[in-house]
Every structure is written in C-alpha cells, then in structure tokens.
Image (spheres, coloured by chain):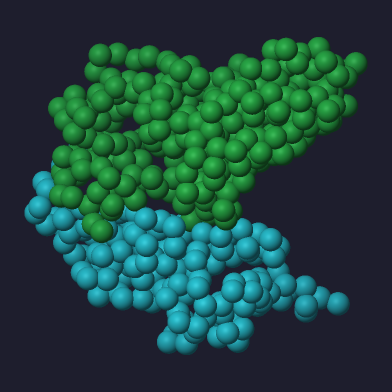
Chain colours: A green, B cyan
Amino acid sequence: MKPVAFEYCRPDTVAEALALLEEFGADATLLAGGMSLGAMLNMRLVRPAAVVDIKRIPGLDAVTINEGEVRTGATLRQAAALDHAALMAAVPLLARALPNVGHFQTRNRGTLGGSVAHADPSSEIPLAIVTLGGSVELHSKRGARRVPAREFFLDILTTTRAADELLTALVWPRARPGAGYAFAEIAQRHGDFAIVACAAEAVVKPDGSLAHLAFGLGGVESRPLVADTAVFLGKHAGASLAAEIAAAAAAAVSPMSDFKASADYRRALINALGSKVVAEAFANSRGALK
Amino acid sequence: MIRLKPGSRHSVNLTVNERERIGTAEPRTLLTDFLRHELKLYGTHVGCEHGVCGACTVMVDGRAVRSCMQLAVECDGASVRTVEGLAEDGALNALQRAFNRHHALQCGFCTAGILMSATHFLAENPDPSEDAVKEMLSGHICRCTGYYPIVAAILDAALEIRPDKQITKEKP
C-alpha cells in the first residue's frame, strides 16, 4: 500500500520543528530515519496531515560524552553509533544491544531517538536505556524537560511525549566502575522483533557477592521493564543465583501472547535466556575487576 | 524550511548512478516508486513495502537502505546508486560475475537489493567472515536459493575485489 496524502515539512532548526508541532499537534508525525514510520505510513496505520522531517536539522545527531553521562542526539543513526568507538566504550550495554537492532540495511538509516519515540515493546534501544536508568530529553514551545526512561514508556507505541513535544536527545549513564554488561534476544530470524530480549548490568564485589544488578526485559509486556532484584543483593553471584533471578523475574511478569509466542513460552525464555544473560553480566563484571 | 503541499507534485533532484536526474513527486511518493515510475529505473524491485524483504534496497549517499521506507522528497539532493549503476563499461562487475558463477540467483527478484547491500557491505568489510555475510543477508529474503550460493558469491567477490589481496599475491 501507499501512504495517505500529507504535507511534507523539513524544518532547518529545532525551533522551526517545534512551531510545526504546535501548528499541527497530533496531526503531525515526526520523521527521523523512518524505519518504523515508513512501514506504518505504507500500511496506513498512521494517516498524518503533516510529516515533519527532522533528519537534516544540524547538530541534532551530536554525541556528547561527559564525566557522568552521555548524550546522544535524537537523529544519531544506529550505524553511526556503532561506529563511534568512544560512545560504545562509554555505554557498553548499548554496544551489545545495537547489533540486534533490525538489519545492516535498516541500521544505516534508523535512529536511536526514533526507536525510543516509537516505543515498540520489543525494541532493543528502549530496553537498554530503561535497564541503565537513563533519561529522555523533550522540547516543546512550552519548554524543555527530562523524563526518566523508566517513566517514559507507557504502553505499546505510547509514551509520555505530548503531541507538541520533540524528543531531542537520549541521556545515558556512563559505565559503572567494575560493572559487567550482557544482552541477548530470541527472534524468529536475526534482526526481527525480539520475542524476548534480556539486558543486564551487574557489579560483583571482589569477594564474589552481588553489589548491583539491573535486569531488563523486552518483548514481554507492553513496555520494557526492569525486574525487582533487590532481595538478591549481597548473595554469591554465580550460575545458581542467575537462575534464581531469572526464575523470579519470569514469575513476576505478565507476558503477552501473540502469533509468535504464548505467555508461557515467553516465561520459559526469560528463564533460559535471562539466566544466561545475568550469568554473563556477572562474569563480565569479574573480568572488569581484573 | 521546506513545506510541500499534499497532493501536488514537487521537483526532486537526485544524482542517480552518477547522472543528474530531475523528476517530480508528491510528498507521499516513495523513493522506490520515484525510481521506477518517474526515472524508469525498473531494476529496483518492490517487495513487501514495509522494510522486511530487502528487494528494494538501494544505496543512498553511499549506504545501503530500503527505498520503500523513504520518501522521494526526503532524498532531494542525495546521491543514489541502483543496480543499473553496477556494470562497468557495459559488462558485469566482479560482484555480479560472482553471482553468475555461483548461481546465486534463480528468479532474480531479490537480487538487485542483495547486490546493493553487498556493494556497501564489501566497501566497509573488504575481508568479511562468512558469519558477517550471513548477518548482512539477514536483511534480505530469497525464496529460491537457500542463501548458500549467495554467501559463496559474496565471499568469492570479496577475494577478487580486495586490492590488498592482489598486492599480497604479487609479493614474494
């Protein structure tokens, strides 16, 4: 199918983009890489009055690496992020997640900000930023705000972004000292939507006890989520603890059922894949200590 | 700022296979349809129209991308390379010859897209592993070959294209 007729707007500045969003409100749709929007336009799942193409706004793809955090501009392409060695070193979980995002051909055009704004529950970039506890920068003519990623996603393709707001950047916490990271997913073919994706950030103390763990799950519920792992802190970080953590997470979630997998199958995947990912994060933390 | 009204046609300038091409498109016209119907370049195929099958892959500003998921007006000013731009002096290039040798196509519907992906891929990865080729091919669907001949053709083409390989051969 082909898209409905719409007005095409290509602002040169963020201010112009915000003026267009104020003018059109919910009848405008923002276009960055278009790797999700393009399909939705073609299938007429979205029927906008205006498409606001932000991809040529100068500087909106900038990467800023500060002492405590890393800021990636909304239109930074996934392939460009993968090629950015300093960014990948500063945010190792993102480096592990990105090769799972779509395909070579879509990462060449798809953006980090677009993936987060689109909010597909199985997407890797939203899962990574939720797991790490990053945040999302939004601008509108009313002002700017920063929303914690864990509060940004509300439901399938639904976020706290208001119709007149532009997602301008993602803010990532830098790698914790001594932390280990791991990411893995199961999909029908490489690059497809994940049936279950698991992400973990762990810090294991020199005595082998668990000091910190963030264990994120994608593709399970209607938005990426982080398991509650507080009760496991201080325990010996080994394979059996990893299995226990995955089992607790699998029991706590309410997975969706769809044509690809039942809720029970997703629970089984959280057990199998989750324990591997958590154990790998433990091992990588031990490696980081050496 | 550029604002193009819905329903009316607007001028789109592209450099296609190193030639300046001008056409007109509605804001909603996909790059695929612009290449085929406006510029009459029918080598680029239209498959799923939602970015999954890879048949429509072309190179825009040097990068392999889906032409079904971008608008012609979005690409105004860009440099586009399509399968028609691969042959050198009217003869198949090294990658195309490798596809021929390895029987890497049967019906040929997916081939144009795969050739364009492989062209970008080999430019970035002159000495690719088999796994890397397969990962790149995960962005394409071929219902004829079972992919193995395609993997073999791309690996073989890499050997032929790579300049350092030829230099190594000449050195003692």
Q: Is residue B8 above or below residue A15?
A: below
Q: Is residue A270 above or below residue B157?
A: above
> Residue at coordinates 54% horizontally, 21% vertically from top-left?
A134
Disc tally is 0
Quadrant containing the C terminus of chain A in the rendered view? top right
> Residue at coordinates 42% horizontally, 15% vertically from top-left?
A146
In the image, B66 versus B18, the foreground residue is B66
In the image, A26 versus A193, the foreground residue is A193
- The quadrant in which residue A218 appears is top right
Residue A184: x, y in percent? 66, 41
Residue A30: x, y in percent? 29, 36
Residue A195: x, y in percent? 56, 43
Left or right: residue B61 versus residue B1 is right
Left or right: residue A100 versus residue B10 is right
Q: Check the image and name the residue furthest to the right.
A: A207
> Residue at coordinates 61% horizontally, 83% vertically from top-left?
B102
Left or right: residue A32 versus residue A26 is right
